Amino acid sequence: MSEDIKKKVQDIFSKNKEAYVSSKTHSNRADLDQITKSLKPQTNWVVLDIATGGGHVAKQLSPSVSTVFASDITKDMLENTAHHLSHLKNVYYVIADAENLPFLNEIFDAVTCRIAPHHFPEPEKFVEEVSRVLKPQGKFLLIDNTAPEDDELDFFYNTFEKKRDPSHCRALKVSEWKEILMENQMTSIKESIRQKPMTFPDWVARTMDDKTIQQEVEQYFLQATEDAKRYFSIKQTNGYMESFAIDEWMILLEKV
């Protein structure tokens, strides 16, 4: 099952590699600046960016650190990103499974992973690997979409993500993430959560070009309960979806 999910990730991200480079969600300047502000990178740091996708975090950190290793499980995605970032001479590209990293113990000063863990079948293994490759007192910056604590809203959210993107595994609740992190020598330094607005046509087309399925996803939103419509700020006009919002959680941790 785990390998099947990872194969779907590789297939979908290979097909949509350019969309993730240009994605407004992933390339948002204010969000990327916040990463630098939170992490406070040092010029001698060696950093690992896991599931780099379009390479936005690697690009953001490159001027501030010694070396960035940008890793991703999808070769086509990584090659495309390397092409776009060819002017950055301190970024190196490594094909890597987030749950089985090909690096030695305790060699990175910081690890980042942004808007990706909801694709990981076994987030516990991912966090174990992050802890393993981090130096003592190393920093881990995790950013991902999270599910509401309410079970019905959690189900609604993960269902529409899966309908739109077969490589989506599950967005965890913040409470679930905290339990995993505490079990892996991680202590929280700071955290924040926000509602992230999503333009529906751009979002649904990023990973799904089948118009029939796009319409099914739209109908799922339009038929949502009133609680779901309020929580996800669902907006429609004349029976068509315009936008919605999801929770995005950022936490900065230190390996103890």
Image: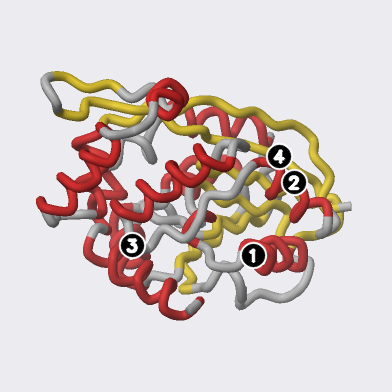
Q: CA distance from mark 3 to mark 1?
A: 20 Å
The residue at 52%/29% (across/down) is 33
Give the image location of residue 138, x and y in percent.
78, 52
Q: Which mark is residue 178?
A: 2
**Along the line of sight, the residue nearer the viewer: 39 or 203:** 203
The residue at 44%/70% (across/down) is 73
Q: Which mark is residue 114?
A: none
Tag 3: residue type?
A: Pro
34 left or right, relative to 76: right
SS at circle 4: strand
SS at circle 3: loop
For label 3, count other residues whose C-alpha is less than 10 Å away and answer few (under 14), some (14-19) or many (20+): some
**Along the line of sight, the residue nearer the viewer: 224 or 89:** 224
Indicate how the structure is coloured in the image. Answer: secondary structure
SS at circle 2: helix
SS at circle 1: helix
Q: CA distance from mark 2 to mark 3?
A: 26 Å
4 vs 1, front mark:
1
The residue at 51%/73% (across/down) is 96
Tag 1: residue type?
A: Phe
Tag 2: residue type?
A: Lys
Tell me which corner region of the image, top left, top right, bottom left or bottom right, holds residue 189.
top right
Give the image location of residue 209, x and y in percent.
14, 55
4 vs 2, front mark:
2
Residue hosting label 4: 252
Q: Which one is earlier in the sequence, the residue at label 4 or at label 1?
A: 1
Residue hosting label 3: 166
Residue hosting label 1: 126
Q: Which one is earlier in the sequence, the residue at label 1 or at label 2?
A: 1
Tag 4: residue type?
A: Leu
